Amino acid sequence: MMRKFWFLIPALFLLAAGISFAEGPELARTPPMGWNSWNHFRLNINDAVIRAQAKAMVDSGMKAAGYEYVVIDGGWEGYHDAKGVFHSNNKFPDMKGLCDYIHSLGLKVGIHDSPGPVTCSGREASYGHEQQDAETFARWGIDFVKYDWCSGSKVYKPDQMKAAYDKFHQAMVSTGRPILYSLCQYGMQNVWEWGASVGGNMWRTTADIQDDYFHMAYIGFEQNGLEKYAGPGHWNDPDMLEIGNGQLKPVEERMQMSLWSLLAAPLFAGNDLTNMTPETLDILSNREVIAVDQDREGIQGHRVWQRGPMEIWMKPLADGRKAVGMFNREKRPMTMTLKLKDIGVTGSAKLRDLWAHKDLGSFTGSYTTRVPGHGVVLLRVEP
Ligand code: GLA
C-alpha cells in the first residue's frame, strides 16, 4: 500500500514548505525603509500627493536603493459611520485604489492611527473600533501601521498602555494580513523593554524630531545604551530623516544618515521625493551607507569613545567587519584619531571611506583624519 504512494512524499515536503512560506518571512528582518509624509507635508496630503511620492520613490532610484514603505501619516482620517466602519476623508476618495496603485509599483503602504479617540491632530482614531479598523486596513491593503499614542491618556491609565498596544496587535493578527507594527509613544515607560512583546516591529524612542541640527544630533547621540533591545524583527526608532527638508547642511545630513545607519534605525525619508537636489538623493541613496544599516546581523551600534564634542561609534557587521563613525559635534573641523583597539581590532585592518567611496589602505594601531564641523567620517573596517 505505502509503496503505491511513495511519489506523494516529495509533494508532502513541498506542502510543508509551502505552509511556512505562506506565513512569509519575518517582518522587518532588517530595519524597515521607506518614506513618510509627516516631516515635509504635515497635514497637507491627499491622494495625488501620495501617488506622486510613491512614483518618485521608484523613478528616483530610491526604491532600487532599498526604500519600500510609503507611509501616509496624519491627515487621511475621515469618520466612523453608523456601523462603525472607518472612512478616509474626501482628500482620499479611494483608499483601496491608492493602495493598489502603490502595490503596483512594487511598494508597500503604511498608515497612521492612534489607540486614543482622536489623533494628535484631533482627527478620529481607533479607540473602541480596534477590531473593525484593523479589518478595514487589511481590506484596503495596508502593510504598515504607525500606532501613535496621541490622546491615549484620555482613555487609558498609564499601566494600560501596553495592553492598548497589544489590543491592536491582536486585532491585526486576526486579519491574517502581515502588517508591520510601528509603535509611536515617544519612548514612554521604556518601550524598548516591552515593545516586541506586544508585536512591535519598531518603536519610537524619543519625542518628535525637528528639521534642525540641534534636534537631530540630540536625538541621535542619545540612543547609546539601547542597542541591546534591537534586533531582527524589532528595532529602536529614533524618528524619521530630515534630509532634504532644508534646514540641515549637507555635512549634517551625512551625519544623520551615518548615525541612523550605525544605529540600525528604520530609514524613513521625510522630504519631498518629487523635488530633490542631486545631493539629497545622493545622501539618501548611498548604498554603502545603507548596507551598514541593513547589515544582516542586525546589531545596533554604540559609542566606543568620546571626548567632548568628538564621538566614535561602532556597529559590528557580518563576517567580522565593523562600521565606524567618527563624529565631530563641534562647528569647526577637528582632527580625530580612531584607536583600532577601541573597536576590538588588534592587528591591522583595511579601511574604506563610505562617503568618499574610497579604499584608504591598511592601518595598524590607529587612523587619524580631519573631520568637518558638524560632520562625520564613516568607515568600514575589515580586520
Ligand atoms: C506625532 C508623531 C509624529 C506624527 C504626528 C502626526 O507627533 O510623533 O511622528 O505622526 O503625531 O500628528
Image (cartoon, grey):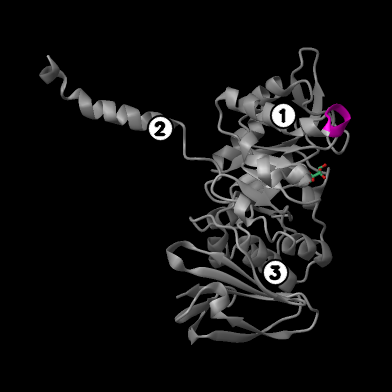
Q: Main secondary structure of the magenta part?
A: helix
100 part of magenta stretch: no
* Marker disc for residue 20: 2
Q: CA distance from mark 1 to mark 2?
A: 29 Å
Instruction: Report which residue position mark 3 lands on.
Output: 255
Which quadrant holds residue 219?
bottom right
Quarter of the C terminus within the rendering: bottom left
Task: Report the side of 289 relative to 254 (left or right).
Answer: left
Mark 1 vs mark 2: give the one in front. Answer: 1
* Span of residues in magenta: 152-157
* Residue receiving disc 1: 163
Query: Looking at the figure, which quarter contains the N terminus?
Result: top left
- Judging depth in this view, the residue of 145 and 72 nearest the camera is 145
Pointers 2 and 3 in contact (C-beta within 8 Å) = no
**Which of the 4 image quadrants contains residue 289?**
bottom right
Pointer 3 and pointer 1: residues touching (CB < 8 Å)?
Answer: no
Q: Secondary structure at mark 3?
A: helix
